Amino acid sequence: MRVAVVGAGPAGVRAVEQLVRAGLRPLWLDEAPDGGGRIYQRPPAGFTRGARALYGLEAAKATALHATLDALKPVTDWRPGTLVWDIGADPRQLHTLREGRAAAQDVDAAILCTGAMDRVVPLPGWTLPGVTTLGGAQIALKAQGCAIGRCVAFLGSGPLLWLVAYQYMKAGATIAAVLDTTPFATKAQALAGLPHDPATLAKGLYYVARLRAAGILVAEGVTPLAIEGEGERGVTALHWRDAAGRERWLDCDALGLGWGVRPELQLADLAGVPIRFDPVQHNWVPERDAMGRTSVRGIYLAGDGAGIGGADVAEMAGACAAQALLADAGLPADAALVRRLQARLRRQARFRAALERAFPFPAQLAASMPDETILCRCERVTAGELRAAAEPEGPQGAAPEVNRAKAFTRIGMGRCQGRVCGMAAAEVLAARLGCGVAEIGRLRGQAPVKPLPFIAAPEAEEAA
Amino acid sequence: MRLVRLVDQDRPAIRFVLEGQDCSARAGDTLLTAILAGEGSFLRCSEFGDGPRAGFCLMGACQDCRVVVEGLGPVRACATECAPGMVVRRA
């Protein structure tokens, strides 16, 4: 039986671990040059920081995951640096790109552990040099030892906001401010649900306390108005409004922003897995059962790509998806392990729901962005142009959903395929049409899921 | 945009070429780091005339950090290690 695992983050590592335990030698692919995923990404050779400096309070988990990852590489068909850019139905095929060479891999089943990326809200000025996602700011530090600027502001909401700011502080970066768009009251109300995972809660409170103790400006319930700057110089200031309604300017030369994360679900989409809107996560997520099974035979999902749960959940979900695959294939499965993991996953789900309530996606901020804001940064489509596509008086009538609006405006048609702007675009369109964001739909996945070089030729043709 | 080298920077110096200019980087730098921690300040100009861009997600998803490397063609600067002698143009 030929099984593929796409992704070598926390979910992928634990999935492969179970497959190998059962005697399989899976094909294991990751786009990055090494495994670990984004959360436990390792710097390239030559960097010397230890796990404690790189991963802080998560150092033990990172070290354990890396040990398993490295032990599994020689007993699997491990192919790092390999992009899976499409997935075919019958026969089941993964279309890959490695070092400029395209190839197709026949498989009987696949576990997709494709992870997540930052969920962002475009602001005026967000295309200026110096603006990155929170995840990007973290990667600059973790994988390259760099800060994104001399004086960095952090803006957004969610656990990553505080974690990245804390990591920058620890590394000696200058932090202009940490600005949270969620009002304190929203978080306090949701705290009632958080004690399901007191360790995670304690970590969050610790980061906030340390930042405040260092005298860093920390504000909650803020409204960002615009990022200011010019040309090659990039960011010079953030214009924002505080909770009391006062307009303020913050001098900074870089800004990390983000509002939680969203699943990278393009491959599940292309495989034919139904996608639904999850109102609690405020994300489009692929449909799967608690074990990671989908309605598409042979396709299993785990980790943040299957709906946001974070790294701990991803490790458990990866093992479960592998166990589901083994059971479905009639191979020996570990029922006791599954029972234990499923009980822990159910507890984590309650914690996650509370976390989503504590850090809700700022739908109104997205819906109300000024007309002149560049909404789609790939194709330079403004919010005003998208709103015009919702006008019934237009030559083509009103676009009733986001894919029609894409055809009218080119929004989401660029190289990122709407990964970055899609969620905010849906909010803008929904607000203008007066309907819910779930009714607006989502930008359908298209192969290749990431750009391929024109020179990419199939390996077979190359040989001929 | 200027990336600031904070920690873990005791790595051998390497040279690469950006827009015909000889530039310095460190072994293990991505092209994005090599350019933005040096004098590069940006990675490309938006083809729609709205100014310079310098990447956004740094994890290979947004495609905003595209540069052109001789022999490789267009690549994501955030996901491409800077090799000694690389000849790079802004896309």
Image: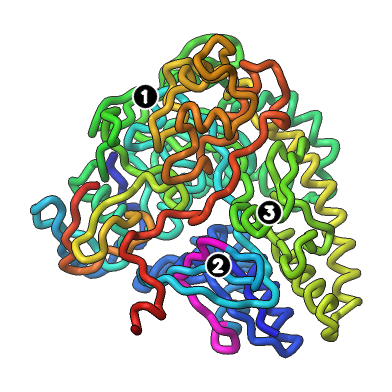
- Residue B79, given in percent of the width and then of the height, sits at 38, 59
Q: Residue at x 62, y 41 (%)?
A: A260
**Mark 1 or mark 3: whose residue is earlier in sequence:** 1
Identify the magenta region: A73-86
Instruction: Give the residue at x 33% y 30%.
Output: A235
Relative to A286, is A463 above or below? below
CB under 8 Å between discs 2 and 3: no
The CA distance from mark 1 to mark 3 is 32 Å
The residue beneath circle 2 is A36
Find disc 1 in the rendering and name its residue.
A237
Disc 1 and disc 2: Cα gap in Å?
Answer: 35 Å
Residue A33 image offset from top left, x and y in percent: 44, 70
Task: Give the residue type at disc 1.
Answer: Ala
Q: Earlier in the sequence, mark 1 or mark 2?
A: 2
Residue A318 in view (yes/no): yes
Label 1: chain?
Answer: A
